[in-house]
Amino acid sequence: MEYDSCILEPFEHLARLTAEERSLLAALEENPRTYPPDTLLNGSGRHQKSFFTLTRGWACALRILPDGQRQILDIYLPGQIMGLREMGHTQPPGEFLALTEVTACPFPGDRLQEVFQASPRLGQLFFRILAGEQSMLIERIVNIGRRPAAGRLAHFLIEMHVRLKFRKPDFELPLSQSVIGDALGLSSVHISRSLGQLREEGLVRMEGRRVQILDLDGLAGLAGFSRDDLTAGAL
Amino acid sequence: MEYDSCILEPFEHLARLTAEERSLLAALEENPRTYPPDTLLNGSGRHQKSFFTLTRGWACALRILPDGQRQILDIYLPGQIMGLREMGHTQPPGEFLALTEVTACPFPGDRLQEVFQASPRLGQLFFRILAGEQSMLIERIVNIGRRPAAGRLAHFLIEMHVRLKFRKPDFELPLSQSVIGDALGLSSVHISRSLGQLREEGLVRMEGRRVQILDLDGLAGLAGFSRDDLTAGAL
DNA sequence: CGCCATCTTGAGGTCTATCAATTTCAGTGG
DNA sequence: CCACTGAAATTGATAGACCTCAAGATGGCG
């Protein structure tokens, strides 16, 4: 269980950091806590708005509608900061749910302000990271708004594949079909059917929670973009 | 036709600006151009990535899928900056479409970098503005993912009403039903039917492109949030 | 007055949700 | 080692939401 500074990774990916910048960022993950799967993360009890850096496991932001439906807004992987978009907003804090066992480090919003003060350049990097997240949200809107179920799934699988850095054609996807459905605006039953369809067409293979991509181009075609778009759009 | 510094407004709304900060921002809208309705805005011909400040009229960001479908990603009102999320990204620039006749000021991405350098505090404000936009995108994902057509429309009308600052219960909405459909992931035909439904239920009245909200609470109920959520979530 | 885009309305078909029954599978205790 | 359990996944049947196609109605504008 290494709690190595995951948070640095996305920043290092954008620019070379000074020692001071690193320690500023590292300070954000000095309070690791472990949460079991299916837990709502709220900042150490008090109702004050709280942010989290995620250092291990999968989590998501979600919204629950009055009629009980869920919409998952965002899926977080280690290294991401949860709550960035609430900076300087008085709105009710978003809800975060641990999808697996998770290690996350809560910190108060003021801390971010301090970082911004101390290092304007880090502020710029935060801006770019937020902009990157926004691009992902845009993709998700296109996906949910204009693609049929199979296409949505194809797009979702590819997005996950890309976000996991193309490691290998197969990867662990610790998400129930119900969670995937709530992320894509579909019912869990229909996820099952659509996955079956992708399997029949020989595009993916799934055993348990492992996904194996057999035909990336086929998936991309279903999702409605070319292989070029893939390499361009990293996290 | 006053091209008054619309861009300052959202910033002034967040913090008191110094004279220097104002002139930095104002420099972003020193190159006004007029575009007729239905024009694609691309930065003065060259393929270089370009941003725009919008000073008059309505515009949107959109994506066109390989099969010809459109998804409108964002609707811009005067004072907004178009393209913020592309900062520091190498992706293909987004497409912007003038929905009415429009006055917009293109400027190169480097200019933003300069602003960030010159005033870290402005950088923070940009960050908060981007965070606010992200909140709107989140709402849109919930809307498209989990609400039936009538609810989506209700939500959309309320969002517009709020963004137009609650001026009056009626306002100008210079959008064709086809545009609304492409923003909500619905067909234009279904927009027509759903609007008819809202009318029959006495929630709104529409003549031409004027919208009159007759029952805000009723609309909010359909959209699935309470009146409280309304006052909280401003632009 | 006539033209064109936009909106409306109808009919039929497709996609997805819902409900419910069954199967799978990992975890648990006998 | 095997039966028991509960969550998750699969499968079938039906209903509902939305789309598409196509034919009128409406309304601004030349």
Image: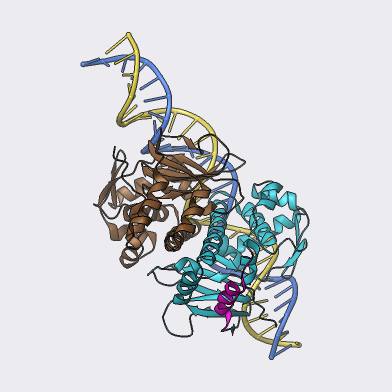
Chain colours: A brown, B cyan, C yellow, D blue
Q: Position of residue B90 (x, y in %)?
A: 37, 70
The residue positioned 39% from the left and 63% from the top of the image is A224
- Asked if residue B100 is positioned above or below residue A154 in the image, the reply reads below
Image-quadrant location for residue B189:
bottom right
The quadrant the C terminus of chain B occupies is: bottom right
Q: Nearer the viewer, residue A130 or C6?
A: A130
Q: Position of residue B70 (x, y in %)?
A: 50, 67
Residue A208 forms part of the magenta stretch: no
Span of residues in magenta: B16-31
Number of dots carrying numbers = 0
- Asked if residue A154 is positioned above or below residue A211 in the image, the reply reads below
The residue positioned 51% from the left and 58% from the top of the image is A145
Can residue B190 be spotted in the picture?
Answer: yes
The residue positioned 38% from the left and 59% from the top of the image is A223
Q: Position of residue A103 (x, y in %)?
A: 38, 39
Q: Nearer the viewer, residue B184 or B186?
A: B184
- Asked if residue A107 is positioned above or below residue A120 in the image, the reply reads above
Image-quadrant location for residue D26:
bottom right
